Image (spheres, rainbow, N blue to C red):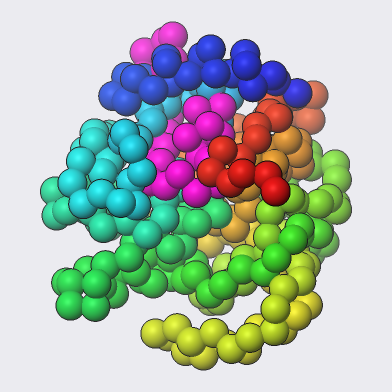
Amino acid sequence: MTSLYKLLAAVPACMALLAGMGSLGASEKPHAVIVVGTLHYSPELTMPALAKELDRLGFSTTIVMGAGDPEKKTKDVLPGIDILAKADVVIFFMRFLKLPDAEWQPIEDYLKSGKPVIGLRTANHSFKYAKDHPRFAWNDGFGRRALGTPYIVHQGGTTEIQAVPKYKAHPIMSNIMKTRWTSPGTLYLTRLEGGCLPLATGTGTGRSRLVERPFGTIQVNEHEADIVAWAWENEWGARVFGTTLGHPGDFAEEAFTRMLVNGICWAVDKPLPGAEEEIATWDIQRADKKKK
C-alpha cells in the first residue's frame, strides 16, 4: 500500500491542471481527464493518486480542480474545464455544483460527443441548480442520462460488497480475485436505467423513511441492498462505468482500485492490466469529516 506521505510529494505534478503527466507524447496515450468538483469524500486527495496510477499504466492524465470549496462557488468553479475537448475519457467526481454557462458548456459538449464517461460516488448528483434555472433538469438528468442513475439517498455505516456472479466475466471484473469485501462508505441507493449491467452489489442499514424526489417517491427500508457498480451505454452512445463507491477508504482495497482501473481501460478499449500487474492501493484518510 502506498504511503500517503509519499503520494502527497507527487501531488504538485498532478495538479498542473493543463499539463499531461506522461513522459511520452500525449498523442500516443489515451487522455484521461479527472474532474474534481467537490470536497465531499476528499477526492482532492484520492484523484491525484488515481491520476498517478493511470499515468503509470499508459494514460496521459489531466486533473481539473479549482481552489476552495466548489460547492460554494458560482464562478471559477472548474478552471480549465475546456480541456474536455481534448479528452478521450472523463472521470467525474462532483457534487451539487452551480456552474456558470462557460463552465457548463464543455461538459454538455463532451457528453454529446459520445465519448466515455466514468462516474464516482457523488457524480450522480453533480449539480444543484435552482428550480427556475434553465439547467434545473440536469440536477437529476446528469446522473440519469450520463451515468445511468439519479441520486436517491444513502444509508448509514459500512457497505458489504459482492461481485455479481452473472457478470463476473465482464472485462471490468477481470482479475478481481475477491468476490466479497467491505466498503467503509455508506450504501447509496440507485434507480438504474434500462440496459445497465450490474457488476457489484452492496448491502447496508439506515433509517426507514419516505424519500420524495422530482422523479418519484421512494420508501427506504432499514435494511437495503442495491447495485454499487455497473456498465452501460448512454443515450449518446458512450461507454459508461458508474459506481457509487469512492469513499477514501475504498482506495485501500485492491478489488475496488482494479475494478476502477479496468473500467477506465475498458471505456477506451485499452488492454486491461494482467493478473500479474499489481494495481496500487492507498491509505488515505477522509479530510472533510472529523473523527468523533
92 on left or right of 190: left
For the image, the number of numbered tags is 0
Any magenta on residue 41?
yes
Q: Is residue 167 visible?
A: no
Q: What residue lies at 72% left-to-right and 73% top-to-bottom? A: 206
Q: What residue lies at 48% left-to-right and 19% top-to-bottom? A: 11
Q: What residue lies at 69% left-to-right and 84% top-to-bottom? A: 208
Q: What residue lies at 74% left-to-right and 50% top-to-bottom? A: 184
Q: Which of the pair 115/42 is nearer the observer?
A: 42
Query: Toward which corner of the image does residue 39 lie, by quadrant?
Result: top left
Task: Note whether 19 is above or below 85 in the view shown.
Answer: above
Q: Which of the pair 120/186 is nearer the observer?
A: 186
Pinpoint residue 205: horizontal percent, then vertical percent.
76, 71
149 on left or right of 115: right
Q: Is residue 119 visible?
A: yes
Location of the N terminus (image quadrant): top right
Find the residue positioned furthest to the front: 292
Task: Note whether 75 is above or below 126 in the view shown.
Answer: above
Pinpoint residue 220: horizontal percent, then vertical percent.
65, 83
Find the residue positioned furthest to the top: 23
The residue segment tinted magenta is 21-49
Pinpoint residue 268: horizontal percent, then vertical percent.
48, 40
Find the residue positioned furthest to the left: 102
49 on left or right of 116: right
Any magenta on residue 227?
no
Pinpoint residue 91: horizontal percent, then vertical percent.
45, 43
Query: Toward which corner of the image does residue 221 lie, by quadrant?
Result: bottom right
Q: Which of the pair 27/97 is nearer the observer?
A: 97
